Image: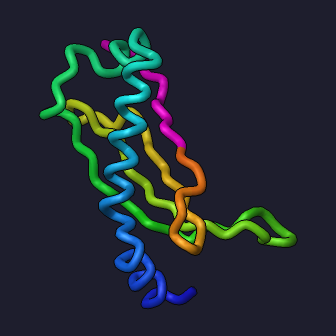
Amino acid sequence: MNENELRHWIVKHHIQARSIEQFWISFHSYKKESLAEFEHYFELFDEQHLDIEIQQIALMLSSPPEYADVHIVTYIPIVYRTKTIGLYRLLFTLNGLVYDDYFTLYEYLRC
């Protein structure tokens, strides 16, 4: 897949909108399932202070030697109150289906 094919694929499969939508689904699920941890990372949560934008979209191949699995990955930094506290990654198959996602928060110490 070359650069132009990837750009066309992104538009065809509505990857940007779907990635943001999936982020919010994962975010609300995380809040519901892990409230204590959520409150640790998102102290006095205010959605206006949560910045969510796609930073990168990349073609990812699995490890050598076969490179059998191929995915398109969107990377969305989780920025709260101007600090990057995590990363959301959404993986798509080449036919545009969601394959998996990763909602990762970084450990940090509040000062």
- As drawn, the residue found furthest toward the left would be 48
Provide the major secondary structure of the magenta segment. Answer: loop
For the N terminus, which image quadrant? bottom right
The one nearer the camera, 5 or 51, is 5
Examine the image and state in which quarter residue 82 appears: top left
The magenta segment? 102-111
The one nearer the camera, 64 or 108, is 64
Can you give x and y, in whole percent of width and height, for residue 98 in the image?
53, 57
Examine the image and state in which quarter residue 78 appears: top left
- Residue located 45% across and 16% down the image: 34
- Residue located 35% across and 69% down the image: 14
Q: Is residue 56 above or below residue 12?
A: above
- Residue located 35% across and 77% down the image: 11
- As drawn, the residue found furthest toward the right would be 65
Can you give x and y, in whole percent of width and height, for residue 54 in the image?
33, 57
- As drawn, the residue found furthest toward the top would be 36
Examine the image and state in which quarter residue 91 appears: bottom right
Can you give x and y, in whole percent of width and height, for residue 88 in the image?
44, 44
The scheme the figure's colours follow is rainbow
- Across the whole image, how many numbered discs are drawn on residues? 0
For the C terminus, which image quadrant? top left
The one nearer the camera, 30 or 45, is 30
Is residue 45 shown left or right of residue 13? left
- Residue located 37% across and 13% down the image: 40
Q: Is residue 109 magenta?
A: yes
Q: Is residue 43 above or below residue 84?
A: above
Can you give x and y, in whole percent of width and height, for residue 33 in the image?
46, 19
